Amino acid sequence: MKLKNRMVISTSYILLRGVRFHAFIGVGEQERCVGNDYILDLRIGYSLANAMESDDVMDTLNYAEVYDLIKNVMQHPMKLLEAAAGCIVDNLTATYKGIESIDLKLIKQNPPMGADCEGAGVELHLINK
């Protein structure tokens, strides 16, 4: 798509940054009972060209709906962050066919490992083929 100033869009993204959840993810049974705090960063490659011209939410990926989908996944107890991240990706790609890529970072704020740190987690970089 060419913009009015003749720039060409090659890649566009929908972003969710620093989304906080309290969830029940952990290998230990105690973690799945008490829970922990998590921070999610998400960047979804998705064409925004139509929405830029139409100014219509139906022509884009509605980030409020994306948040609701992620919130639903995070409400289910799991053992591994990897499983939670994979479930989020599976749900996103099943729901939104136009997704070109996903960059997802899911961090457990207080991991039970005896370290003084800001968190531990997983990061995924996926491209739809």
Image (tube, grey):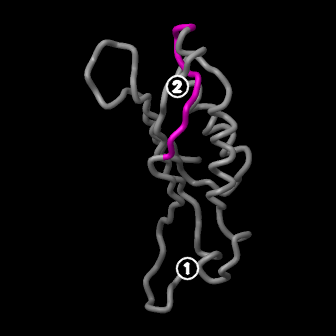
In the image, is 70 to the left or to the right of 104? right
Residue type marked 1: Met
Q: Look at the image and tell me in which quarter the N terminus lies.
A: bottom right
Q: Position of residue 77 (x, y in %)?
A: 64, 21
Q: Position of residue 5 (x, y in %)?
A: 44, 91
Q: Secondary structure at mark 2?
A: helix
**Residue 23 drawn in magenta:** yes
In the image, is 36 to the left or to the right of 113? right
Front: mark 2 or 1:
2
Pointer 2 residue: 82
Mark 2 or mark 1, earlier in chain: 1
Q: Which residue is most to the top?
A: 29
In the image, is 76 to the left or to the right of 25? right
Q: Compare residues 116 and 93 and report the one nearer the observer.
A: 116
Q: Compare residues 96 and 81 and report the one nearer the observer.
A: 81
Q: Which residue is most to the bottom?
A: 4
Q: Which mark is residue 18?
A: none
Pointer 1 residue: 1
Q: Looking at the picture, does residue 68 appear above or below residue 108?
A: below
Q: Position of residue 79 (x, y in %)?
A: 57, 16
Q: Which residues are magenta?
A: 19-29
The image quarter in which residue 6 lies: bottom left
- In the image, what residue occupies the spot 53% across and 50% down? 101
Q: Secondary structure at mark 1?
A: loop
What is the C-alpha distance between the residues marked 2 and 1? 36 Å
Q: Compare residues 81 and 19 and report the one nearer the observer.
A: 19
Residue type marked 2: Glu
**Residue 7 drawn in magenta:** no
Q: Looking at the picture, does residue 122 appear above or below residue 127?
A: above
